[in-house]
Every structure is written in C-alpha cells, then in structure tokens.
Image: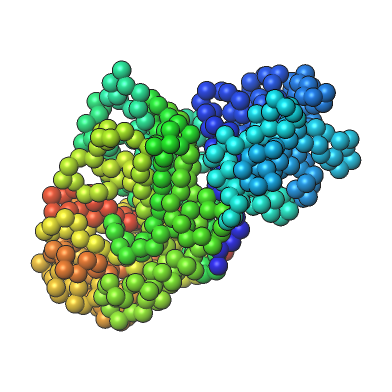
C-alpha cells in the first residue's frame, strides 16, 4: 500500500508552475535570497522550499515592512506557514490560495484579500493568490479564471491540490524536498555547461537525464562540436544520477530493500540549452519523465513502472511525471514512488514466465533483491530533435541523453563473523544480433576473495559452453568445502584470469528467441585476511554487443560490517 503524499513533488512543484516558474529571470516569487525588494511578491519565495526569505518554512523578506497592502503593514517576521500551526485556516498561505479557487472552482467572485488571525497574533490581511483581477464595480472582488493551470490542479471533481495541502498541514508540514547532493542549492550551485554546437541564431532547449555528476547532455556520436568520446559513460549504470531517498528527501544507500518499505526515487534532469522548456514556456512544450524498476541485471529485463510522485492521489498508478519548467543551464529533480512490496510482486509475477531460473522460485530469486531503475525523458524539445542519438547504436544512456539507468547493488561482508559467500542474481538480455559478451572487472585481493558465476545448466549448454569461457573454469566445490550454489539446477564457474581489461570474459550466443537469461555472481571471502585491509571499490560486470560496444552492466558495492557497524566503502 502506498505511503504518504510527497508535498515537494505533488504540491510545491504545482505552486511553482502556477506562479510562472520563471526563476531564471529573478522575477516575482523566484528572486534569489540575496535580492532585496520592497514588493511583497519578492518577499515570499517559491525558488525552493527552504529559501531564506519567504520559503515554505521561513518568514518574509527584510523589506516587507515597507509594503502596504490595503492599509495592512507587514514585517519580516510574518510567516505564510506559522511554525507548529496545524490548522489550515490559521495558515495564511493556505487561506489565500484557497480563496483564489472560488466557490465553484472556476476562479470567479474571488475576494482580492483574506483576513487571518494566527495564534497569539493580531488579525492579518493578506493578498489572495494567484492574484485575481479586480472588477470595476467592486475592487474587492475579482476573477482568477485566467490561471488555468491553477484551476486544473483544483478540479471540482477529483483530488484537489488545496485539499491535499490542507492534509499536509494537519499532518505537521513535513519538509520533504530533496537533500544533500540533490538539494536545490547543490544543483543550482553548478548548473550544466552550455551545450556545444547550438547555432548562435537559435534559442532552443537541450534536455537530458543526468548520467553522471556535472552532466551536460553530450553523448557519443550525437554531432555536437565537442564529442565526449566513446568511453565517456562506460559505466553509466554506476554514475546515473538516480537516488533513493526517505520521505524527508534524505538520500539512502540501503544494503537490502525490505518488503513493506517505501522509498522515493529521485532523478536529476537537466537543460544545457539556451532556452527554457515545459508547459510554463508553451503549452506544446510539455516535458514528461518516466521510471521503470527492472529485475537486477545488465541492460533490459521484465519491468514495472513506478508511479509519479506528482500524483495527488497516492494510489494513482499514473507513471508520467510532468516537469512544468526547466530553465536553460539548470538541473531539477523528478520523483517516483518506489513501493518495495509492489515492485517485488510485479517482478515476481513475470519472472518465471520470462526466464529459466534453474528451478528456483521467483520469490527466492528476488529475495534480498535490488532492482535496476531505468528513466526516460520525452517532450519539451523542437522537432526534428537537435543532436539526436547516433544511428545504429543501442538505446542506452551511452548514446541517448534522454535515458539513464542505475544498477548498483550493495552487499555485506561481515568481518567479525567468519567466512561467507554472497550471490547476486542477475538478468542478462540480448543486445543487437550475434554474440554478446560479459567482462568481469575488479581489484579484489586474490588471497582473500574468490569470484564465481552461476547459471542454469540449460542456459550454459545452449548459449555458452566451455568454448565461451576465458578466465573462467568449471568447478564443483569452493575453498571451504561443498559450494553453496545460487539455485538448484546450476553450473558454477570460478574466476581464474586477471580481472583487468577483458581478461575474464564470457561469450554468450545470440539468444533472441529466449529474451532473458538468468545468472548469478558469487563473491566468497576469507574474513581473517580482511581484518587489516580496506575492501576495494565496486565489482563490475560489463555487457558488450557483438561489435564490442558497451551496452550495459551491473556493479556490486561492498559494505563492510565491523562489529555490527556498516561502513560505506568505495
């Protein structure tokens, strides 16, 4: 069952859209915190939820006292959302927004001001927002019907934004905007570089999903004047700017995804062009983002869509997140609901019908599972598409700036608890036609670690065979006795070659008639030889097409447990 409504994605973004979303122009409600204006509009900021002056949880700006509205004097301690006040009717921001909708949800006969008496304060008069146009007959009554987006967010039938905002206030006004590396301040401090190659006489957006920190949208072979080169995103699945957060927006790095838990999937998107985009710019420039959860693996697999966090109904399965505005040379964050139980059940229902699991049940295959997240951005750019993906190449983030993927799975190494082995089940898809290949790369010390690869017997015999092995050998037992296999019907290989370059490689025959192959990577370690060592960085499995192009991959990321304390390594 879905959890709480996320205020940032579902409501705050719609308030920004209603106010015009033009924060790059430093106008009205999008002035930087350092801007000093006497206009009250400059005193309440929608630039970010945590803006210094007039942010959702802050007070008006230093010049508020100089602004007089219908005889009401404000001061820099006027709070649109008073701290600790959970009655919506005592929160000025909710009252002034609610008034603008009108009794019939049509924006008609709207008062131009509202009066609120916050706790322990005298009565306050605030301007109704969005500000109605006063009628000539009665300047205290006007029409807000021109704010069509605002009214569409508050339909007469169906969930209304204003009601959801009231629920959020009653629940304590949780501050749930993205934090840390995906906060507004962090992303605004270093926006994407201008995209090279846009003609001087053109103003156009160049949109992308960020596949690395500082991404500017350039991709191999897209025709820009500074091609990033063939190896620019060789391990895009580890660098994609896709994060799991808790419901306060703090980034999480869970070792496992327990059933019954929920996360937000936060995705960094960007515009390195010379013009803004989105419905705020023009009704025909709408930007949409979708995200799918895939079974953990290299490229594609059976999948389930993640609901958009912009949905006002938390049970709405709509998977399309609309980005209302994306200014030139800016980043922003799109959000999706990651209900672990739903993702687990959806993938389990598809798994055994799509893939040979070596007689392992779908539930056991996915137990302790991390899924991959694949993101796609559509719309918001001119046609024909500027700087399109290179023809004839796989549809991956390496070549298409509108795609991003994150396949990064932590696993635990208990240094205080003896030896062990960790198996990570993965799905391998067919890329293009002909032979595909898997390369193993890592820097684990050979005296402490052994790496294995398991696959169903029929998969091995039909698509690999001993002729497809380089740097692997067939095994039956591990270092510490009988080997614990990942699934009942299984062939196990042990790494013998050096895991640099292409020294440990598996050739896989064309398997388009069987879209997905199941495999498992095993890591065995000897705890006694690790107590004085720091575990190296991630372990990578890289998937190549027949021409050697990197099409995808997955990575395991060690988490070392020293006396029950888990440390992030790498």
Q: Position of residue 387 (x, y in %)?
A: 26, 33
Q: Nearer the viewer, residue 549 or 495?
A: 549
Question: How far across and how far down the image is residue 33, in percent?
Answer: 63, 26
Q: Is 511 displayed left or right of 326 in the figure?
A: left
Residue visible at 47% across and 67% down? 342
Question: Relative to 102, is 229 on the left or the right?
Answer: left
Q: From this viewpoint, which residue is outermost toward the front? A: 137
Q: How is the image coloured?
A: rainbow
Q: Quadrant of residue 408?
A: bottom left
Residue at point 66%, 24% (across, down): 42
Residue 226 placed where, x, y %? 26, 27
Residue 562 seen in render: no
Q: Is residue 442 left or right of residue 564?
A: left
Eyeballing the image, is 353 above or below 82? below
Q: Eyeballing the image, is 455 above or below 102?
A: below
The correct choice, above or below, for 293 with respect to 455 in the image is above
């Amino acid at each position: 069952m879905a959890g709480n409504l996320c205020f940032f994605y579902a409501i705050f973004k719609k308030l920004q859209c209603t106010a015009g979303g033009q924060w790059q122009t430093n106008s009205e409600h999008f002035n930087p915190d350092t801007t000093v204006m006497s206009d009250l509009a400059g005193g309440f900021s929608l630039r970010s939820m945590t803006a210094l002056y007039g942010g959702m949880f802050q007070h008006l700006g230093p010049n508020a006292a100089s602004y007089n509205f219908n005889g009401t004097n404000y001061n820099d301690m006027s709070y649109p959302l008073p701290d600790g006040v959970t009655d919506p009717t005592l929160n000025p921001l909710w009252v002034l927004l609610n008034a603008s909708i009108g009794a019939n949800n049509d924006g008609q006969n709207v008062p131009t001001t509202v009066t609120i008496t916050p706790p322990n304060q005298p009565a306050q008069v605030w301007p109704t927002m969005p500000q109605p146009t006063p009628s000539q007959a009665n300047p205290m009554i006007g029409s807000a019907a021109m704010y069509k987006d605002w009214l569409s967010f508050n339909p007469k039938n169906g969930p209304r934004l204003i009601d959801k905002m009231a629920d959020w206030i009653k629940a304590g006004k949780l501050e749930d905007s993205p934090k840390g590396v995906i906060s507004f301040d962090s992303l605004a401090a270093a926006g994407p570089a201008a995209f090279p190659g846009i003609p001087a006489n053109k103003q156009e957006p160049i949109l992308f999903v960020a596949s690395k920190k500082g991404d500017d949208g350039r991709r191999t072979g897209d025709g820009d004047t500074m091609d990033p080169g063939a190896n620019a995103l060789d391990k895009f699945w580890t660098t994609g700017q896709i994060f799991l957060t808790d419901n306060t927006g703090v980034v999480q790095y869970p070792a496992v995804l327990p059933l019954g838990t929920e996360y937000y999937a936060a995705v960094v998107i960007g515009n390195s062009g010379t013009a803004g985009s989105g419905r705020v710019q023009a009704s025909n420039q709408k930007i949409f983002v979708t995200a799918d959860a895939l079974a953990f693996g290299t490229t594609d697999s059976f999948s389930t869509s993640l609901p958009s966090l912009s949905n006002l109904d938390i049970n709405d399965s709509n998977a399309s997140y609309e980005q209302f505005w994306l200014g030139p040379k800016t980043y922003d964050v799109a959000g999706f609901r990651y209900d672990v139980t739903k993702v687990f059940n959806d993938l389990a229902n598809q798994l055994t019908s799509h893939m040979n699991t070596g007689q392992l049940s779908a539930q056991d295959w996915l137990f302790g599972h991390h899924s991959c997240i694949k993101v796609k951005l559509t719309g918001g750019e001119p046609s024909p598409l500027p700087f399109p993906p290179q023809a004839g190449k796989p549809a991956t983030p390496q070549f298409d700036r509108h795609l991003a993927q994150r396949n990064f799975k932590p696993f635990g190494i208990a240094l205080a608890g003896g030896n062990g082995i960790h198996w990570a089940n993965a799905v391998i898809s067919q890329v293009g036609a002909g032979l595909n290949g898997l390369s193993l790369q890592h820097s684990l010390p050979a005296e402490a670690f052994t790496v294995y690869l398991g696959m169903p017997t029929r998969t091995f015999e039909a698509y690999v065979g001993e002729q497809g092995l380089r740097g692997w050998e067939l095994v039956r037992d591990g270092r510490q006795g009988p080997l614990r296999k990942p699934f009942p019907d299984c062939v196990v290989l042990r790494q013998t070659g050096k895991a640099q370059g292409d020294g440990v490689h598996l050739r896989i025959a064309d398997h388009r008639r069987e879209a997905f192959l199941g495999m498992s990577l095993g890591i065995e370690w000897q705890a006694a030889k690790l107590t004085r060592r720091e575990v190296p960085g991630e372990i990578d499995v890289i998937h190549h097409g027949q021409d050697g192009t990197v099409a995808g991959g997955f990575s395991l990321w060690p988490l070392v447990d020293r006396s029950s304390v888990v440390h992030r390594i790498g």
